[in-house]
Image: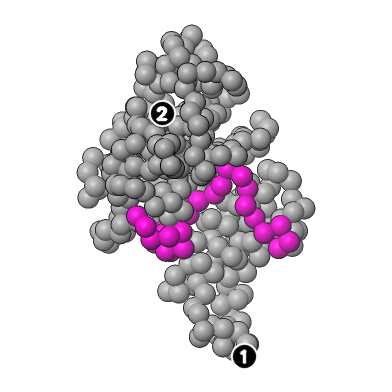
Amino acid sequence: MTFPRQAGHAASVAGSVAGSEAAALLAVSGVRLAYGGVTSLDGVSFRLAPGTLAALIGPNGAGKTSMVNVISGVCRPDAGTVVLRSPDGRRHELTGRGPTRVSRLGVARTFQNIRLFGGLSALDNVRVGLDNRPRGRGGAGGLGDLAAGLARTPAFRRRERAADERAAALLALVGLAGREGASAAALSYGERRRLEIARALGTDPRLLLVDEPAAGANHAEKQALVALLRRINATGVAILLIEHDMTMVAALATTVVVLNFGRVIATGTPAEIRASQCVQDAYLGGPVEPGAELERPAGAGGVARSAGPAEAGGGA
Protein backbone atom coordinates (compact mmCIF):
# COMPACT_ATOMS: atom_id res chain seq x y z
CA MET A 1 0.00 0.00 0.00
CA THR A 2 1.33 3.45 -0.89
CA PHE A 3 0.24 6.93 0.09
CA PRO A 4 1.39 10.22 -1.46
CA ARG A 5 3.99 11.75 0.81
CA GLN A 6 3.28 14.84 2.85
CA ALA A 7 4.92 18.05 1.68
CA GLY A 8 7.99 18.74 3.77
CA HIS A 9 8.06 15.12 4.98
CA ALA A 10 11.83 15.18 5.47
CA ALA A 11 11.67 17.95 8.06
CA SER A 12 14.24 17.72 10.82
CA VAL A 13 13.42 16.16 14.15
CA ALA A 14 13.74 19.55 15.80
CA GLY A 15 10.87 20.79 13.65
CA SER A 16 8.37 18.52 15.37
CA VAL A 17 9.86 17.75 18.76
CA ALA A 18 10.32 20.94 20.72
CA GLY A 19 13.79 21.41 22.15
CA SER A 20 12.58 22.74 25.49
CA GLU A 21 9.43 22.61 27.57
CA ALA A 22 8.96 26.36 27.06
CA ALA A 23 8.71 25.83 23.27
CA ALA A 24 6.58 22.69 23.46
CA LEU A 25 2.85 22.35 23.08
CA LEU A 26 3.05 19.10 25.09
CA ALA A 27 5.84 18.03 27.41
CA VAL A 28 5.81 14.50 28.85
CA SER A 29 8.48 14.09 31.53
CA GLY A 30 9.46 10.94 33.40
CA VAL A 31 6.02 9.34 33.32
CA ARG A 32 5.70 6.04 35.15
CA LEU A 33 2.57 3.91 35.40
CA ALA A 34 2.12 0.42 36.81
CA TYR A 35 -0.83 -1.94 37.17
CA GLY A 36 -0.08 -4.12 40.15
CA GLY A 37 3.25 -5.74 39.36
CA VAL A 38 3.17 -4.85 35.65
CA THR A 39 4.99 -1.67 34.62
CA SER A 40 3.21 -0.12 31.66
CA LEU A 41 5.20 3.12 31.37
CA ASP A 42 8.74 3.39 32.70
CA GLY A 43 10.09 6.94 32.70
CA VAL A 44 8.60 8.10 29.37
CA SER A 45 9.68 11.57 28.20
CA PHE A 46 9.07 13.39 24.92
CA ARG A 47 7.90 16.79 23.67
CA LEU A 48 5.70 17.90 20.80
CA ALA A 49 5.84 21.29 19.10
CA PRO A 50 2.66 23.23 18.27
CA GLY A 51 1.00 22.15 15.03
CA THR A 52 3.08 19.00 14.61
CA LEU A 53 1.91 15.68 13.20
CA ALA A 54 3.79 13.01 15.13
CA ALA A 55 3.35 9.27 15.60
CA LEU A 56 3.70 7.07 18.66
CA ILE A 57 4.50 3.50 17.68
CA GLY A 58 5.66 0.26 19.25
CA PRO A 59 4.89 -3.47 19.42
CA ASN A 60 1.71 -4.70 21.09
CA GLY A 61 1.92 -4.07 24.83
CA ALA A 62 4.57 -1.36 24.47
CA GLY A 63 2.50 1.16 26.44
CA LYS A 64 1.04 3.31 23.66
CA THR A 65 -2.57 3.35 24.83
CA SER A 66 -1.43 3.74 28.44
CA MET A 67 0.46 6.86 27.35
CA VAL A 68 -2.66 8.23 25.64
CA ASN A 69 -4.69 7.46 28.77
CA VAL A 70 -2.24 9.44 30.88
CA ILE A 71 -2.18 12.44 28.52
CA SER A 72 -5.98 12.51 28.25
CA GLY A 73 -6.54 12.22 32.00
CA VAL A 74 -8.03 8.72 32.04
CA CYS A 75 -5.11 7.40 34.13
CA ARG A 76 -3.09 9.22 36.76
CA PRO A 77 0.60 8.25 36.56
CA ASP A 78 2.55 7.04 39.55
CA ALA A 79 5.30 9.57 38.76
CA GLY A 80 6.16 12.22 36.20
CA THR A 81 4.31 15.14 34.64
CA VAL A 82 2.35 15.98 31.50
CA VAL A 83 2.28 19.70 30.69
CA LEU A 84 0.25 21.49 28.00
CA ARG A 85 1.20 25.05 27.10
CA SER A 86 -1.51 27.44 25.95
CA PRO A 87 -1.00 29.92 23.07
CA ASP A 88 -0.41 32.74 25.58
CA GLY A 89 2.42 30.74 27.15
CA ARG A 90 0.62 29.61 30.27
CA ARG A 91 1.66 26.22 31.64
CA HIS A 92 -1.14 23.73 32.42
CA GLU A 93 -0.19 20.52 34.19
CA LEU A 94 -2.58 17.81 32.99
CA THR A 95 -1.50 15.18 35.49
CA GLY A 96 -4.44 14.14 37.66
CA ARG A 97 -6.94 16.63 36.22
CA GLY A 98 -9.40 14.09 34.78
CA PRO A 99 -10.68 13.71 31.19
CA THR A 100 -13.24 16.54 31.25
CA ARG A 101 -10.79 19.15 32.49
CA VAL A 102 -8.06 17.95 30.11
CA SER A 103 -10.50 18.16 27.20
CA ARG A 104 -11.46 21.71 28.11
CA LEU A 105 -7.80 22.68 28.20
CA GLY A 106 -7.48 21.62 24.56
CA VAL A 107 -6.71 17.89 24.31
CA ALA A 108 -9.13 15.55 22.51
CA ARG A 109 -8.85 11.86 21.70
CA THR A 110 -10.39 9.01 19.79
CA PHE A 111 -10.37 5.38 20.90
CA GLN A 112 -8.99 2.19 19.38
CA ASN A 113 -12.39 0.63 20.06
CA ILE A 114 -14.89 3.15 18.70
CA ARG A 115 -17.01 4.79 21.41
CA LEU A 116 -20.09 6.57 20.09
CA PHE A 117 -23.67 7.01 21.21
CA GLY A 118 -25.26 4.48 18.87
CA GLY A 119 -28.82 5.68 19.43
CA LEU A 120 -28.01 9.33 18.69
CA SER A 121 -27.76 10.88 15.25
CA ALA A 122 -24.38 11.75 13.76
CA LEU A 123 -25.17 15.42 14.34
CA ASP A 124 -26.03 14.87 17.99
CA ASN A 125 -22.86 12.85 18.57
CA VAL A 126 -20.84 15.85 17.40
CA ARG A 127 -23.00 18.15 19.54
CA VAL A 128 -21.80 16.20 22.58
CA GLY A 129 -18.28 17.36 21.79
CA LEU A 130 -19.41 20.92 21.21
CA ASP A 131 -21.15 21.04 24.57
CA ASN A 132 -17.92 20.02 26.31
CA ARG A 133 -16.16 23.20 25.24
CA PRO A 134 -15.53 25.89 27.86
CA ARG A 135 -18.46 28.29 28.22
CA GLY A 136 -16.52 31.11 26.61
CA ARG A 137 -16.02 29.03 23.46
CA GLY A 138 -19.67 28.04 23.08
CA GLY A 139 -19.94 25.10 25.45
CA ALA A 140 -22.78 24.34 27.84
CA GLY A 141 -23.02 26.88 30.64
CA GLY A 142 -24.62 25.06 33.56
CA LEU A 143 -27.80 26.24 35.30
CA GLY A 144 -27.98 29.49 33.36
CA ASP A 145 -28.15 27.66 30.04
CA LEU A 146 -30.59 25.15 31.52
CA ALA A 147 -32.95 27.95 32.47
CA ALA A 148 -32.55 29.59 29.06
CA GLY A 149 -33.26 26.25 27.40
CA LEU A 150 -36.43 25.70 29.39
CA ALA A 151 -37.60 29.19 28.52
CA ARG A 152 -36.45 28.84 24.88
CA THR A 153 -35.05 32.37 24.94
CA PRO A 154 -33.92 33.96 21.64
CA ALA A 155 -30.29 33.84 22.79
CA PHE A 156 -30.60 30.14 23.53
CA ARG A 157 -32.14 29.44 20.10
CA ARG A 158 -29.32 31.34 18.41
CA ARG A 159 -26.71 29.28 20.25
CA GLU A 160 -28.52 26.07 19.28
CA ARG A 161 -28.57 27.06 15.60
CA ALA A 162 -24.89 27.99 15.73
CA ALA A 163 -24.04 24.66 17.36
CA ASP A 164 -26.00 22.73 14.72
CA GLU A 165 -24.21 24.62 11.97
CA ARG A 166 -20.82 23.97 13.54
CA ALA A 167 -21.61 20.25 13.96
CA ALA A 168 -22.74 20.01 10.33
CA ALA A 169 -19.52 21.73 9.20
CA LEU A 170 -17.42 19.22 11.14
CA LEU A 171 -19.37 16.33 9.62
CA ALA A 172 -18.67 17.79 6.18
CA LEU A 173 -14.96 18.10 7.05
CA VAL A 174 -14.74 14.37 7.79
CA GLY A 175 -16.76 13.39 4.72
CA LEU A 176 -20.15 12.82 6.34
CA ALA A 177 -22.13 15.65 4.72
CA GLY A 178 -25.72 14.51 4.22
CA ARG A 179 -25.47 11.94 7.03
CA GLU A 180 -26.40 14.32 9.85
CA GLY A 181 -29.65 12.52 10.67
CA ALA A 182 -28.34 8.96 10.43
CA SER A 183 -27.91 7.15 13.74
CA ALA A 184 -24.35 6.31 14.65
CA ALA A 185 -25.27 2.62 14.82
CA ALA A 186 -26.43 2.71 11.17
CA LEU A 187 -23.12 4.06 9.84
CA SER A 188 -20.45 1.88 8.27
CA TYR A 189 -17.27 1.09 10.18
CA GLY A 190 -15.26 3.72 8.31
CA GLU A 191 -18.00 6.31 8.80
CA ARG A 192 -18.08 5.65 12.54
CA ARG A 193 -14.31 6.18 12.69
CA ARG A 194 -14.71 9.55 10.99
CA LEU A 195 -17.67 10.47 13.19
CA GLU A 196 -15.57 9.88 16.30
CA ILE A 197 -12.91 12.22 14.90
CA ALA A 198 -15.59 14.85 14.18
CA ARG A 199 -16.87 14.59 17.75
CA ALA A 200 -13.33 15.05 19.09
CA LEU A 201 -12.87 18.11 16.88
CA GLY A 202 -16.07 19.53 18.35
CA THR A 203 -14.17 20.28 21.57
CA ASP A 204 -11.89 22.71 19.63
CA PRO A 205 -8.67 20.86 20.52
CA ARG A 206 -5.14 22.09 19.99
CA LEU A 207 -3.89 18.50 20.32
CA LEU A 208 -5.74 15.50 18.90
CA LEU A 209 -4.76 12.00 20.07
CA VAL A 210 -5.81 9.43 17.46
CA ASP A 211 -5.55 5.83 18.69
CA GLU A 212 -5.15 3.30 15.85
CA PRO A 213 -7.67 4.85 13.44
CA ALA A 214 -6.69 2.46 10.64
CA ALA A 215 -7.46 -0.71 12.64
CA GLY A 216 -9.84 -2.80 10.54
CA ALA A 217 -9.85 -0.27 7.68
CA ASN A 218 -9.52 -1.26 4.03
CA HIS A 219 -7.21 0.40 1.52
CA ALA A 220 -9.70 3.06 0.40
CA GLU A 221 -10.60 3.91 3.99
CA LYS A 222 -6.92 4.31 4.88
CA GLN A 223 -6.36 6.60 1.90
CA ALA A 224 -9.32 8.75 3.00
CA LEU A 225 -8.04 8.77 6.58
CA VAL A 226 -4.59 10.00 5.53
CA ALA A 227 -6.19 12.85 3.58
CA LEU A 228 -8.48 13.71 6.51
CA LEU A 229 -5.69 13.83 9.09
CA ARG A 230 -3.69 16.09 6.78
CA ARG A 231 -6.66 18.45 6.43
CA ILE A 232 -7.09 18.58 10.20
CA ASN A 233 -3.39 19.20 10.78
CA ALA A 234 -3.41 21.97 8.15
CA THR A 235 -5.89 23.89 10.32
CA GLY A 236 -3.23 24.12 13.06
CA VAL A 237 -4.35 21.19 15.21
CA ALA A 238 -1.39 19.11 16.39
CA ILE A 239 -1.90 15.36 16.04
CA LEU A 240 -0.32 12.45 17.89
CA LEU A 241 -1.10 9.32 15.88
CA ILE A 242 -0.90 5.87 17.48
CA GLU A 243 -0.68 3.40 14.63
CA HIS A 244 0.76 0.02 13.59
CA ASP A 245 0.57 0.65 9.83
CA MET A 246 4.08 1.96 9.14
CA THR A 247 3.27 2.93 5.56
CA MET A 248 0.59 5.23 6.90
CA VAL A 249 2.93 6.56 9.60
CA ALA A 250 5.62 7.30 7.00
CA ALA A 251 3.09 9.14 4.82
CA LEU A 252 1.86 11.36 7.65
CA ALA A 253 4.34 11.88 10.46
CA THR A 254 7.36 14.16 10.47
CA THR A 255 8.50 12.65 13.77
CA VAL A 256 8.05 9.20 15.31
CA VAL A 257 8.43 8.25 18.97
CA VAL A 258 8.97 4.53 19.56
CA LEU A 259 7.97 2.76 22.78
CA ASN A 260 9.00 -0.72 23.86
CA PHE A 261 8.36 -2.24 27.29
CA GLY A 262 7.11 1.16 28.44
CA ARG A 263 10.29 3.05 27.53
CA VAL A 264 11.17 5.40 24.67
CA ILE A 265 13.80 3.57 22.62
CA ALA A 266 14.01 5.92 19.62
CA THR A 267 12.81 9.28 18.29
CA GLY A 268 13.32 10.57 14.76
CA THR A 269 11.97 10.88 11.25
CA PRO A 270 10.21 7.83 9.74
CA ALA A 271 13.32 7.08 7.67
CA GLU A 272 15.58 7.25 10.73
CA ILE A 273 13.23 5.04 12.72
CA ARG A 274 13.05 2.47 9.94
CA ALA A 275 16.85 2.26 9.83
CA SER A 276 17.22 2.01 13.61
CA GLN A 277 18.64 -1.31 14.77
CA CYS A 278 16.98 -1.09 18.19
CA VAL A 279 13.58 -0.55 16.53
CA GLN A 280 14.15 -3.50 14.20
CA ASP A 281 15.06 -5.65 17.18
CA ALA A 282 11.97 -4.52 19.10
CA TYR A 283 9.60 -5.41 16.28
CA LEU A 284 11.17 -8.48 14.73
CA GLY A 285 14.03 -9.55 16.95
CA GLY A 286 16.65 -8.75 14.31
CA PRO A 287 17.50 -6.75 11.18
CA VAL A 288 14.82 -5.93 8.64
CA GLU A 289 15.32 -6.94 5.03
CA PRO A 290 15.23 -4.05 2.53
CA GLY A 291 11.65 -3.32 1.50
CA ALA A 292 10.11 -5.14 4.47
CA GLU A 293 7.52 -3.43 6.66
CA LEU A 294 7.93 -2.91 10.39
CA GLU A 295 4.78 -4.83 11.23
CA ARG A 296 5.27 -7.41 13.94
CA PRO A 297 3.98 -10.86 12.90
CA ALA A 298 1.11 -12.28 14.93
CA GLY A 299 2.42 -14.55 17.65
CA ALA A 300 6.03 -13.38 17.37
CA GLY A 301 7.79 -13.92 20.67
CA GLY A 302 10.35 -12.04 22.67
CA VAL A 303 8.76 -8.59 22.66
CA ALA A 304 5.16 -8.51 23.86
CA ARG A 305 4.43 -8.50 27.55
CA SER A 306 1.33 -8.93 29.64
CA ALA A 307 -1.02 -5.98 29.16
CA GLY A 308 -2.37 -3.97 32.06
CA PRO A 309 -6.09 -3.27 32.46
CA ALA A 310 -5.92 -0.18 30.26
CA GLU A 311 -4.48 -2.22 27.40
CA ALA A 312 -6.34 -5.51 27.72
CA GLY A 313 -8.86 -6.18 25.01
CA GLY A 314 -7.17 -4.30 22.20
CA GLY A 315 -5.15 -1.43 23.70
CA ALA A 316 -1.45 -1.18 23.07
Taking the spot 36% from the left edge, 22% from the top edge, the residue there is: 272
Q: Amino acid at mark 1?
A: Ala
For mark 2, give the secondary structure: strand
Percent of width and height locating residue 78: 34, 48
Percent of width and height locating residue 147: 56, 88
Quarter holding the N terminus is top right
Label 2, residues with CA under 10 Å away: few <14, some 14-19, many ≥20: many
Q: Nearer the viewer, residue 312 or 124?
A: 312
For mark 1, give the secondary structure: helix
Number of marks: 2
Taking the spot 31% from the left edge, 52% from the top edge, the residue there is: 83
Q: Amino acid at mark 2?
A: Asn
Mark 2 — residue? 260
Q: Quadrant of residue 46?
A: top left
Residue 96 forms part of the magenta stretch: yes
Mark 1 — residue? 151
Percent of width and height locating residue 180: 70, 61
